[in-house]
Every structure is written in C-alpha cells, then in structure tokens.
Image (cartoon, rainbow, N blue to C red):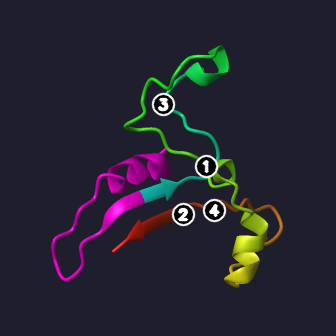
Amino acid sequence: MKILLLCGRLSKLTVNTDCTFTDVLSLSAGPCVYCAKCAYLEGEKCNFLDKVVWSVEANGIDVMALVKDFGIPYNNGKNTVSYVALIMFNS
C-alpha cells in the first residue's frame, strides 16, 4: 500500500531547512499490513516496531468528528470510499 510506505518513510523524516521536523507520527487508514497475521493477535510483540503504521482510530481519534471540525467532506458521493490518514509532527 502506497500510503503505508509513505507513512513509514515520513516517520523517519528530518528536514534541515527553515524548519526541522522531528517526532513525526503518521497514522493511516485501516490496519498495518506488514505481517500476513499480526503477531499481537497471537499474544506476541510486534515484529516490525520500526515500520508499523497505526490507524487513526486505533489512537482514539474520532475520524468523523475530525473531518467535520476541519470541514473535510467524508462522503464524496455515490459509489465512493473515503480514507483518512494523518501526519502529525512537532516543528
């Protein structure tokens, strides 16, 4: 999934220009897809803690309230699917 790959790269991002971005947290839509079956479901620790991408909802964020507060359309019409991902950082 392109979004997960992008989020994984952004999690390690440091830009040394006018702004320095550190402590990047990227949250995706849907589950992490690095394992065929999540180790957590077997009572084990994550095998890819350096790559895992958590979902927005798994972090307790109400997606519907978030998009409403920011005026972002969630329903984009008949026969469409909408996804919400976040990239949060300290600068």
Query: Of the residues tagged 3 and 2, which is closer to the observer?
Result: 2
Q: Residues within 10 Å of mark 4 (few under 14, many from 20)?
A: some
Amino acid type, residue under disc 4 in the picture: Val
- Viewed as shown, does residue 42 lie left or right of 32? right
Query: Of the residues tagged 4 and 2, which is closer to the observer?
Result: 2
Give the farthest residue toward the right. Answer: 78
Residue 33 figure quarter: top right
Residue 59 in percent (x, y) is at 64, 52
- Viewed as shown, does residue 52 lie left or right of 31? left
Chain part drawn in magenta:
1-24
Q: Earlier in the sequence, mark 3 or mark 4?
A: 3
Q: Secondary structure at mark 4?
A: loop
Q: Are marks 4 and 2 in contact (CB under 8 Å)?
A: yes
Q: Residues within 10 Å of mark 1 (few under 14, many from 20)?
A: some
Q: Are marks 1 and 4 in contact (CB under 8 Å)?
A: no
- Give the answer, above or below, for where 90 lies relative to 4: below
Q: Which residue is mark 2?
A: 86
Q: Earlier in the sequence, mark 3 or mark 1?
A: 3
Q: Secondary structure at mark 3?
A: loop
Q: Which mark is residue 34?
A: 3
Q: What is the spatial separation of the Cα atoms under label 4 and label 2, in whole angstroms?
A: 7 Å
Q: Which residue is mark 1?
A: 55
